[in-house]
Image: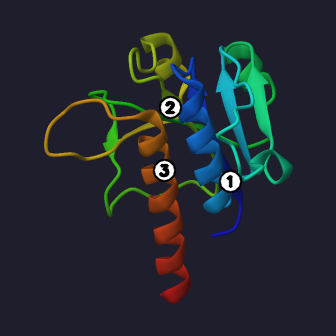
Amino acid sequence: MNGYFGIAVWHPKTESNVGTLWRHANLYGAAFVGTVGLRYRHQASDTSKVDRRIPLIHYTDLDDLVRHLPLGCPIIGVELDPRAKLLDESFHHDERALYLLGAEDHGLPPAVLDRCHRIVQIPTPSVQSMNVAVAGTLVMHDRYAKSLQAVAA
């Protein structure tokens, strides 16, 4: 798959989740990682020095994020929402995308979801929220796996 993607967290609850997501974003080839609202601080547990390989961008609010999105890069909300499409074999990733995740305790607010170009939901046997770093990693893995399938086809 040509193109690029970034992944961001809306008002992240914990710094450790941002750090984990950042490391996994590096593994899956993300172009950038972002936070909207709260800021990530370096932790001693970040032993992989991922900041040398992939940028972490802090956006003050949604308007700041939208103003600084690359041209033609849609926002794909990752959220439990009735409008969401399942992240299954029928879901096609955009060539360029910013995946926006909500914090575990509040998710993405309705006003933010309204500004997303699309919304995707990770299928699970029960409808409960999951850890934001895990959710982001699953989305990135799905994108990666589908890109491998496209190459093999």
> Amino acid under label 2?
Leu
In this view, 137 is above or below 19:
below
> Amino acid under label 3?
Thr
Based on the displayed image, in which of its 4 quarters is residue 67 positioned? top right
Residue 33 can be seen, yes or no: yes
Q: Which residue is drawn at 76% across and 24% down?
A: 58
| Circles 3, 1 touching at the beta carbon (< 8 Å) | no
Q: How far apart are marks 2 and 3 (CA)?
A: 11 Å
| Circles 2, 3 touching at the beta carbon (< 8 Å) | no
Q: Name the residue under label 3.
A: 137
Secondary structure of the residue carrying numbered label 1: loop
Q: Which of marks 2 and 3 is nearer the N terminus?
A: 2
Of the two numbered discs 2 and 3 in the rendering, the one whose residue sits closer to the viewer:
3
Q: Name the residue under label 2.
A: 101
Toward the bottom, the furthest residue is 152
Instruction: Give the numbered dot on residue 30.
Output: 1
Based on the displayed image, in which of its 4 quarters is residue 62 positioned? top right
- Callout 1 crowding tier (Cα within 10 Å): few <14, some 14–19, many ≥20: many
Secondary structure of the residue carrying numbered label 2: strand
Q: Which residue is drawn at 68% across and 55% down?
A: 26
Counting from the top left corner in percent of width and height, residue 139 is at: 46, 51
